[in-house]
Image (spheres, helix red, strand yellow):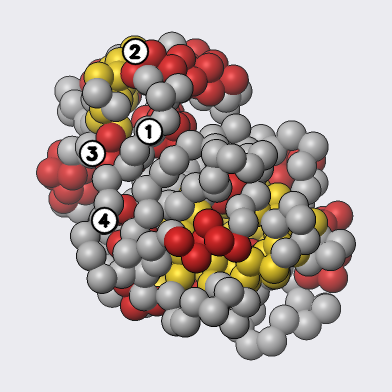
């Protein structure tokens, strides 16, 4: 995905020159406290809209600041749809240990940007008072009060965000996925989930990092997999991955300190000789070795340019969170490189179609040249 960062920075710089009279600003502040936020998608000029990967363990416990740089709470957990690799909601609450009586809020990922320091998160155009007025729930009843389709829709409507669908699947807590045991279909232990690699503003789980040390004799090295490769059973608190111990042992690994490189390099894929856990799990993906450069992704013979294009188009048409224009953008694939062209309605459309294309091809092989209609009308061509 190629974003025109210069255009975004110019637009932000221009907006910072607008100065409101004191009385007008005071009236607007009073109005904001009594109404839901009007827009959570526009970054303020005192932070950066970063799309850098983070570890789930680093996000949980991170401080959250409101739009006025006042502390608004702490990230307590992430509610995720592992099958589609999506972060559905970010759980925010008071710092310290979570108590059963604590009132927590579940916010869409698009509410957040990273502070320039990278040490905390900022709420886009939200004050602490607006957050307090948001729907609340207790962690002891998180599934009933925050993780149903109805509750997710209610939360997204309050924050004026486009709700993500997850069908009849159950959402899971990232804190419970991390540390969960991983077994294969033959009930052989393969390891445990060391961490999740996520891109919070886009609401994406990029990789699930597997540690096999102590299980398979692989010392201090990790392997990354696409989240769609796993099936989670909350009753037994375990994940199923369709691989043999031998295939994991033979796959190149990376050191814990080099976890960011697994996003650039891609992920290991379950062996094609085993029943795949997901539609894409049988494809030969990219492995990363911590002591060498990333190895290029090798597509199976079935993953031709034509099949890549067809699969992306099918996923675009099936995603009802996208506008009609976004579902019908031009998709062209040449030598494994995907190019998206056309005009979409919103920035969400622009980001989401990149995510869908990247779920079929590598993110490094996707060139999103689509334009956002609102920016085109305003005379600012943004990609």
Mark 3 = which residue? 3
Which is more foreground, mark 2 or mark 1?
A: 1
Which mark identifies residue 299?
1
Which is more foreground, mark 1 or mark 3?
A: 1
Mark 2 = which residue? 330
Q: Does residue 327 lie above or below 182 as drawn?
A: above
Residue 250 visible in the shown view: yes
Residue ID at (75%, 71%): 103
Q: Residues within 10 Å of mark 3 (few under 14, many from 20)?
A: some
Q: Report how far apart the C-alphas of labels 2 and 1 lie in the structure.
A: 22 Å
Asked which secondary structure carries label 3, the reply is loop
Q: Report how far apart the C-alphas of labels 1 and 4 lie in the structure.
A: 15 Å
Residue 62 image point, x, y percent: 49, 76
Q: Does residue 193 lie above or below 271 as drawn?
A: below
Q: Residues within 10 Å of mark 2 (few under 14, many from 20)?
A: some
Split into 4 quadrants, where in the image is the N terminus? top left
Mark 4 = which residue? 294
Residue ID at (54%, 66%): 210
Split into 4 quadrants, where in the image is the C terminus? top left
Q: Residues within 10 Å of mark 1 (few under 14, many from 20)?
A: some
Residue 311 image point, x, y percent: 49, 20
């Amino acid at each position: 995905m190629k974003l025109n960062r210069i255009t975004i920075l110019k637009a932000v710089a221009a907006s910072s020159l607008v100065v409101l009279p004191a009385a007008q600003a005071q009236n607007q502040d009073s109005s904001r406290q009594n109404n839901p936020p009007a827009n959570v998608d526009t970054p303020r000029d005192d932070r950066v809209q970063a799309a850098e990967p983070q570890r789930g363990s680093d996000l949980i416990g991170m401080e959250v600041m409101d739009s006025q740089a006042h502390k608004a709470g702490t990230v307590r957990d992430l509610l995720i749809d592992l099958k589609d690799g999506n972060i559905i909601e970010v759980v925010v609450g008071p710092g310290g240990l979570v108590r059963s009586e604590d009132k927590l809020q579940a916010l869409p990922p698009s509410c957040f940007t990273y502070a320039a320091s990278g040490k905390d998160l900022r709420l886009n155009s939200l004050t602490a008072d607006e957050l307090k007025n948001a729907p609340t729930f207790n962690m002891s009843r998180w599934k009933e009060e925050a993780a149903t389709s109805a509750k997710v829709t209610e939360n997204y409507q309050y924050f004026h965000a486009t709700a993500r669908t997850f069908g009849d699947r159950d959402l899971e807590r990232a804190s419970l996925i991390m540390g969960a045991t991983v077994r294969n279909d033959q009930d052989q232990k393969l390891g445990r989930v060391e961490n999740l690699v996520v891109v919070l503003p886009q609401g994406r789980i990029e990789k699930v990092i597997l540690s096999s040390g102590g299980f398979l004799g692989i010392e201090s090295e990790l392997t990354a997999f696409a989240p769609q490769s796993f099936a989670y059973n909350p009753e037994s608190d375990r994940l199923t991955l369709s691989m043999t111990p031998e295939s994991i042992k033979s796959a190149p690994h990376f050191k814990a300190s080099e976890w960011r490189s697994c996003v650039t390099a891609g992920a290991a894929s379950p062996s094609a000789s085993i029943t795949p856990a997901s539609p894409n799990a049988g494809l030969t993906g990219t492995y990363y070795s911590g002591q060498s450069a990333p190895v290029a992704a090798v597509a199976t013979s079935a993953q031709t340019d034509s099949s890549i294009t067809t699969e992306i188009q099918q996923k675009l048409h099936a995603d009802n969170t996208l506008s009609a224009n976004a579902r019908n953008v031009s998709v062209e694939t040449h030598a494994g490189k995907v190019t998206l062209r056309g005009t979409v309605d919103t920035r969400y459309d622009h980001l989401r179609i990149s995510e869908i294309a990247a779920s079929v091809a590598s993110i490094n092989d996707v060139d999103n040249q689509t334009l956002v209609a609102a920016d085109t009308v305003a005379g600012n061509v943004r990609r």
